[in-house]
Amino acid sequence: MAQHASLTWLDVRILFGSVAGPGTKLGGAGAAFGLICLLAAIFGMVRVIWTWPRASRAEQLLFAAIVFNLGTYLVSVMPSPHGSRELAAVLPCGAVLAARALVPARITSMPRAFATVAATGLVALLPLAAAATRPPARPATAPLAAWLEQHGLTYGIAGYWDASIVTLQSGNRVQIRAVDPVPAHLRARLGDEHAVVQRVPV
């Protein structure tokens, strides 16, 4: 459980962008911004706990959604350095709670409202503009798909993460089918069903 808790916390930080995920790079400014966002979400959650009897039903439901998502992930077999996508719901729920905690409920002054909206828009646009200047990420399997096609290897089997993406990357010119290695045989992935495709010695 301690290892699951450590991996869950790592995945939450990766999700918010405060640390780099496996195979990715993260600058100091990006990590600092991600940490600020994570702390704001934590502050929003603490505020809901502190004001629970007075908190709105929406805030209580968002808090419960975060706790349920994190709790389910924590006790499952999913925690890994690549599992932050399994916690995707935590990010928007945390963002809403952060906004509810940090933004005044009513802004009656027009200049103040304009300044708040302008500052919020600027803060939102900065990371988007920085991300837009980066070159598009090339799938790690692109060289593999090209190599297989160049060498006339157009059909085969592979693990789950390499099969479909190579087939897609090559435009179906290299057809790779996903299999799972299990004791004494390989089995094909056919949606929710599995079929034995090859027996191997134990």
Image (spheres, grey):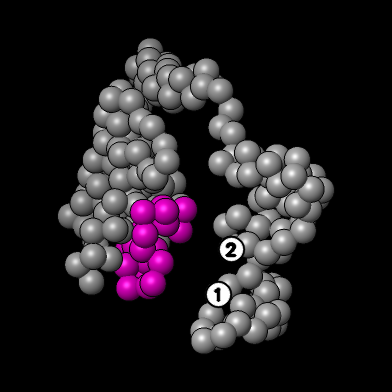
Q: Is residue 96 visible?
A: no
The location of residue 161, given as percent across then percent down, is: 57, 57
Nearest the viewer among 32 and 61 is 32
Q: In the rendered image of this protein, does residue 13 appear above or below residue 75?
A: above
Q: Is residue 65 magenta?
A: no
Residue found at x 30% / y 39%: 19
- Marks 2 and 1 in Cβ contact (< 8 Å): yes
Residue highlighted by disc 1? 181
Of the residues shown, which amino acid type is indicated by label 1? Pro
Q: Is residue 80 magenta?
A: yes
Residue found at x 18% / y 55%: 50
Nearest the viewer among 6 and 105 is 6
The location of residue 170, given as percent across then percent down, is: 75, 44
- Report, in whole angstroms, how far the alpha carbon at label 2 lies from the one at label 1: 8 Å
Q: What numbered label is drawn on residue 159?
A: 2
The location of residue 39, given as percent across then percent down, is: 24, 40
Q: In the rendered image of this protein, does residue 116 appear above or below residue 177?
A: above
Mark 1 closeness class: few <14, some 14–19, many ≥20 residues within 10 Å: few
Q: Residue 36's quadrant in the figure? A: top left
- As helix, strand or loop, the secondary structure at mark 2 comes to loop
Mark 2 closeness class: few <14, some 14–19, many ≥20 residues within 10 Å: some
Residue found at x 52% / y 18%: 133
Write the start and end of the magenta stretch as one range.
Answer: 66-87
